Image: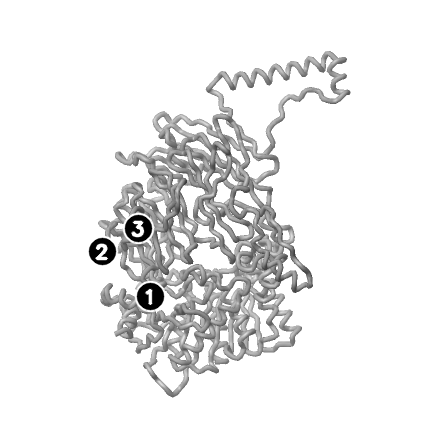
Amino acid sequence: MIKQSLLSIAVASSLMLTGCQTTSQTQQSEAAVQPIPSMVSTPVDFGGENITLEQAMAHPDWISRKPESAFWAADSNTAIFSQKQVGNELRDTFMVSTSSSPQKVMLDQLHTVGAQDAIYSRDGRYQAYTFEGNVFVKEMSSGVLKQITHSSEKEHDLQFLNSGELAYRIDNTFYRVDLASGRTHEIVKLHLSDAPKGLQEPSTYIAKEQHKLIEFVALQHKNKADKQAREEALKEKNATIADNHFYLGKGKQLIEASLSPAGDKLIAVISDPRSWRDDGDIMPNYVSQDGHIESVPARRKVADAKSHSSTVIFIDIPSKQQTELSYDTLPGFDEDVLAAVKKENAEREGKTYQSKKAPRDINIMPPWGLDPVQWNSAGNEVALMLEAWDNKDRWIATVNFDKQQLVSQHRLHDDAWVNYAHNDFGWFNNSNTLYYLSEQSGYSHVYTKPINGKATQLTKGKFVVSDLTLAKNDAHIYFKANVKHPGIYEIYRVNTRTGEREQLTDLNGMTDYSLSPDESKLLLTHSTIMMPEELYITDVQPNAVAKRVTHTVSEAFANKKLIAPKIVAVPSSHGEAPIYSKVYYPADYVEGETGKKRKAIIFNHGAGYTQDAHMGWSYYFREFMFHSLLASEGYVVMDMDYRASKGYGRDWRTAIYRHMGKPEIEDLVDGVNWMVDNTNVDREAVGTYGGSYGGFMTFMALFTQPDVFKAGAAIRPVTDWAYYNHGYTSNILNHPDIDPIAYERSSPIYFAQGLKNELLINAPMLDDNVFFQDVVRLVQRLIELEKTGFETAIYPVEPHGFRQPSSWLDEYRRIYKLFKENL
């Protein structure tokens, strides 16, 4: 029964691909929740044309020009989305509903459809958004649209104030506009300079004598003093003059500025100026527009990054007072959280380390799709999300305006690192209660906390919650989660009072959502393993049927014969949790077959912290087709969500802390053992490949497990983590100055002597993510080690993500040849 159900996943996906009737949702759901590794069956041939390598690597327009950046229009019935044009990178805008097919929006009407970040007044009377930097307001009842600004400036940060006015920002100045009269007022103007000193009285002996002895000098001074006094009196007595200047300090950099809905307070975050690069951070472009070698700016390396802190400033606008808020009220602000790491590294050098407390560098949380400063609806409370530069702590803190100090509401500490994702937070609309995501239980879950009360965990279980949306009446929080299977993401909501959870979709794939303005419907972006994303609309109620409103998959793609992968749970020899993996069985595979042994390849996904063994359309769609091609030729192909992958909780994510390339390769070895035991694979004929983080893993697999992997292809690979960026690497390995041990045992260049089988290195030369320098240094290391089993292919015009189909094709022809000749 289990085997038959698991087969239905592949059968249903393949049937969908060829336009035949699919199995029922009930069958798909039953199949999806079975995490059994022994899911073996004979693939079904549904006809169609075989995929070729040339077609798989062609521009993806041939597959689907899928809907992008979808959002709700103000009417809560119409969805707006973008679609790529054929043959270029331009996008058209379309509108669609459940009762009408997609209609193209003409250029002269683009300003009328709203925007993905449109906002709504609390009373529901108005919608506001920007189009090409100008502000537009729509009256919801009449549908009348009014253009508020018409300039070359870029208005942004729209918000409705409690007064009913609309506020917006241009550069570092905030304005409010009366929607009835159209009159605009300046609220506050921030200056990155010191406050003007005004007229200074003579202070030195010579200056005083000059004013005493020279009548003309004294008269000039008096005239200036009179003028200054007059200007100050005019500003004080005449309400028509704006005087809302605040000075944040000369040479400072403004990181964040957030205005209260009451319009009377502002939080500003500043720091000393810092650049993302130094003068020496460049890469050469040998194929430039003018034929000369061009020096392209590149980002700084983690080894060159320096610790820094930012300053939070509270501004009381009516009183013109501004106050720096100290971090010393945050729990753990001065802890030596890396004491054990520092001690281990010191002992290696024959030194001792004495731990001591000292203030840590703390900054506002980078805006990874969220606003790190959140005001309550009344505008009299504010919450900030802060993080330590050492990546071990995240705080949610409110501000006591009377004492002018931060008050910690939640501290999330992680001995490894705090996740850069799953940091949604905000206020209830009708009470001073915070809601937020936290991994403190080991998985990302929803919590609520009254400002003066204790926190409550609303969702629980071994699944991951993301993408929170709070209902207007605070009764529910909507979210996306993989509750029923790690690779299936559905939409849910939780009752904020009882904690009762409702499942709102049952589509069995990868599903994202947007709640309609009137909260009656969901706009869904849904995909399956075999089908790219399409848009669906459904009512907000359990068991509602989702109606598909876009059909963008091409007939050419629908007619291709592709092998649907099956998701298996590979037992781990290093922990209780299995390693979820996609397996592409050969087209001629028969369960329990013996005799001729199969060749096998393990694909390593990139990014480290991403997920690919899920039931949705893969980011690696070219690889999906390549794997289907290989399976059609008799290979077994496995795509593993090794430790560090997304979707499996905190412990899986942080298993690589201070030792990248060891737990992941252990998981690959378990994958090889599983294929040998379950799919008749020849242990002597296993290869591996991957790009970016997957390229790094390919190196570590061939360098540290040469008896397991007989050939490998490393694409745009990291070879030395000290050369990668700070934001990603320092989370996992700390900083090279603090933890060189972690870098040395995690970087392939230190293990290159282990290579004894065939290695292909594919390197783009304009890669501003993983530098071409990584490959150059490793190749020189391999030459000095007198290794012979490696080849290098370079791509002169390509960045990290290839753009030219010819480059994709050349790369995968080489990979195909590598495995054909060496397995």
Depth-wise, is mark 3 or mark 1 nearer the camera?
Answer: 3
Q: What's under tag 3, amino acid-wise?
A: Gly
Above or below residue 255? Residue 637 is below
- How far is disc 2 from disc 1 in space, using C-alphas? 24 Å
Q: Residue under circle 2?
A: 543
Residue 523 placement, left or right of 802: left
Q: State the residue in front, 353 or 503.
A: 353
Q: State the residue in front, 56 or 728.
A: 728
Residue at image point 65% right, 55% down: 354
- Residue 673, given in percent of the width and then of the height, sits at 44, 78
Residue at image point 25% right, 55% down: 546
| Residue 499 image label | 3
Q: Count all numbered tags in the image, as a single digit.
A: 3
- How far is disc 3 from disc 2 in space, using C-alphas? 20 Å
Residue density around tag 1, few if under 14, some if 14–19, many if 20 or more, within 10 Å: many
Q: Earlier in the sequence, mark 3 or mark 2?
A: 3
Residue furthest toward the top?
215
Q: Residue under circle 1?
A: 530
Q: Are marks 3 and 1 in contact (CB under 8 Å)?
A: no
Q: State the residue in front, 287 or 668.
A: 668
- Residue 207, given in percent of the width and then of the height, sits at 74, 20
Residue 735 placement, left or right of 41: right
* Quarter placement of the N terminus: bottom left
Q: What's under tag 1, amino acid-wise?
A: Met
Secondary structure, mark 1, is loop
- Residue 254, given in percent of the width and then of the height, sits at 54, 39
Q: Earlier in the sequence, mark 2 or mark 1?
A: 1
Residue 480 placement, left or right of 316: left
The scheme the figure's colours follow is: one colour
Secondary structure, mark 3, is loop
- How far is disc 3 from disc 1 in space, using C-alphas? 35 Å
